[in-house]
Image (tube, helix red, strand yellow):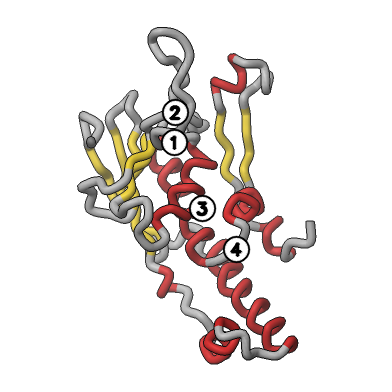
């Protein structure tokens, strides 16, 4: 696809999905997701999609360390409601990477509901962060926040944005706007992927899942 070149340079997220092994979709169950996968899911590339991708990446790193994260082995908590602001977009990226799903997700196999994904994603939760990830097997969690002001838009993009939105920009202006928009995303992914000022993380000990 004709994605910007920086997509291939962005960090990837590697996990192991035991359900894929069980049902024969993959011998190893090892999945590697790229930023392009998140873009194909969302249909666009923006600071929110990039921020969600980086938050989940950082959260999984905090919870698993040198271990390979287990897809389907993490609960995702969203502070906002599913129709509130960009909550749904962020949650969709989290589902892509972690497998955690709301009530529409896979219900599991057998009487013990092995590999269940349903209910692992929850909205309107009482967390002190934009998002939280939690490992049910250890009870350990991480609170995550995103501050996109760390990578501000360029002054030129700010000037072009109203015209682009109002559909009064010319072709050259629209092309310049799109380039500047993606330059900001590129800075987030390539120069600030591990920036603690962009992605805030805090340990969260939650012995029981939140309702």
Residue 48 pos. (x, y %): 48, 62
Does 94 appear above or below 153? above
3 or 1: tag closer to the N-terminus: 3
Q: Secondary structure at mark 2?
A: loop
2 or 3: tag closer to the N-terminus: 3
Q: Quadrant of the C terminus?
A: top left
**Cα distance in 3D space between marks 2 and 3:** 19 Å
Q: Secondary structure at mark 1?
A: loop
Residue identified by numbered label 4: 45
**Cα distance in 3D space between marks 2 and 1:** 5 Å
Residue visible at 30% across and 49% down?
A: 143
Residue visible at 42% across and 73% down?
A: 150
* Residue 117 marker: 2
* Residue 101 marker: 1
Residue visible at 62% across and 74% down?
A: 183
Residue identified by numbered label 3: 53
Residue visible at 33% across and 48% down?
A: 78
**Cα distance in 3D space between marks 4 and 2:** 26 Å
Residue found farthest to the right: 1
**Cα distance in 3D space between marks 3 and 1:** 16 Å
Q: Secondary structure at mark 4?
A: loop
4 or 2: tag closer to the N-terminus: 4
Q: Quadrant of residue 86?
A: bottom left
Q: Quadrant of residue 101?
A: top left
Q: Is residue 142 left or right of residue 174?
A: left
Select label 3 or label 4 by which is in front: 4
Q: Is residue 37 left or right of residue 59?
A: right
Q: Do the CB atoms of the residues marked 3 and 1 lie less than 8 Å apart? A: no
Nearest the eye: 151 or 77: 77
């Amino acid at each position: 696809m004709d994605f910007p070149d920086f997509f291939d340079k962005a960090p990837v997220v590697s996990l192991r999905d035991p359900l894929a092994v069980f049902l024969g979709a993959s011998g190893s169950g090892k999945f590697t997701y790229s930023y392009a996968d998140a873009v194909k899911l969302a249909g666009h590339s923006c600071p929110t999609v990039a921020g969600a991708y980086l938050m989940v990446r950082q959260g999984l790193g905090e919870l698993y360390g040198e271990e390979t994260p287990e897809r389907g082995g993490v609960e995702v908590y969203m502070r906002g409601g599913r129709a509130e602001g960009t909550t749904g977009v962020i949650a969709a990226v989290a589902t892509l990477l972690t497998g955690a799903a709301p009530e529409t997700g896979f219900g599991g196999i057998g009487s013990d509901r092995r590999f269940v994904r349903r209910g692992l994603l929850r909205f309107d939760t009482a967390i002190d962060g934009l998002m939280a990830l939690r490992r049910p097997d250890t009870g350990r969690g991480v609170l995550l926040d995103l501050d996109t002001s760390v990578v501000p838009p360029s002054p030129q993009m700010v000037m072009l944005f109203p015209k682009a939105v109002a559909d009064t920009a010319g072709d050259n202006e629209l092309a310049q706007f799109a380039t500047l928009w993606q330059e900001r995303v590129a800075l987030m992914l390539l120069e600030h992927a591990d920036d603690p000022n962009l992605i805030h993380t805090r340990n969260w000990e939650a012995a029981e899942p939140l309702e």
